[in-house]
């Protein structure tokens, strides 16, 4: 058997194995836990909820953006967040202080060998009287960076 034939056979085996892994990841979408996570979003939001399956891991991503909030205590947001506050979910929050007050709420849940990852991106109105970005201090940093180049004899 030629080297090419051996390599082509190996590539074919690898491709078939990847097809099986992809089918397994696609089957995760049919799990009731995934449907429940999707349906935790209000009916009026579901058209804008994104859902995807990771290419190289057993993770399902569900995400939505909530804009135009008066504050992060807005009932629309708090009711949504409460749906993912159960003990089966692990939560974390990222806060951003760029142009508009913005927080990303992330929730993860492990279910029989796969992960459901829900992200809710919340944006407060830039002119909200209840929530704004304020400067609370200044940090100065001095950066020292080496400059390198390749020198060959």
Image (cartoon, grey):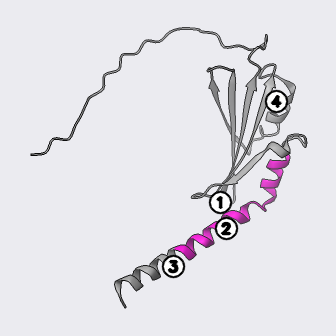
Name the dominant secondary structure of the magenta segment: helix
Mark 2 → mark 1, Cα distance in angstroms: 11 Å
Q: Earlier in the sequence, mark 2 or mark 1?
A: 2
Crowding around mark 2 (Cα neighbors within 10 Å: few <14, some 14 to 19, many 20+) is few
Residue 134: percent from the left, percent from the top? 64, 10
Q: Which residue is drawn at 41% across and 79% down?
A: 7
Dot 2 and dot 3 residues touching (CB under 8 Å): no
> Between 27 and 14, which is closer to the camera in this rendering?
14
Q: Provide the secondary structure element on which disc 1 rests.
A: loop
> Between 89 and 43, which is closer to the camera in this rendering?
43
Mark 2 → mark 4, Cα distance in angstroms: 33 Å
Q: Residue at x 82, y 58 (%)?
A: 32
Residue 30: percent from the left, percent from the top? 78, 62
Q: Which mark is residue 12?
A: 3
Q: Which of marks 4 and 1 is nearer the N terminus?
A: 4
- Please report the bounds of the magenta region as a residue range: 15-39
> Disc 2 vs disc 3: which is toward the camera?
3
Quickly name the residue at label 1. 113
Mark 4 → mark 1, Cα distance in angstroms: 30 Å
Crowding around mark 3 (Cα neighbors within 10 Å: few <14, some 14 to 19, many 20+) is few
Task: Please determine whether, in this image, residue 7 is positioned above or below residue 130.
Answer: below
Q: Residue at x 43, y 12 (%)?
A: 140
Quickly name the residue at label 2. 24
Quickly name the residue at label 4. 77
Q: Earlier in the sequence, mark 2 or mark 4?
A: 2
């Amino acid at each position: 058997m030629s080297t090419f034939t051996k390599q082509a056979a190996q590539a074919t085996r690898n491709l078939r194995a990847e097809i099986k892994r992809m089918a397994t990841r696609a089957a995760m979408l049919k799990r009731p836990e995934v449907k429940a996570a999707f349906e935790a979003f209000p009916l009026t939001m579901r058209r804008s909820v994104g859902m995807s399956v990771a290419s190289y891991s057993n993770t399902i991503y569900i995400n939505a953006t909530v804009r135009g909030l008066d504050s992060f205590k807005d009932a629309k947001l708090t009711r949504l967040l409460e749906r993912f506050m159960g003990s089966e979910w692990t939560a974390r929050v990222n806060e951003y202080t760029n142009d508009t007050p913005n927080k990303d709420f992330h929730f993860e849940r492990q279910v029989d060998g796969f992960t459901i990852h829900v992200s809710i991106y919340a944006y407060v109105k830039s002119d909200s009287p209840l929530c704004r970005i304020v400067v609370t201090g200044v940090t100065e940093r001095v950066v020292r960076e080496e400059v390198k180049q390749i020198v060959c004899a």
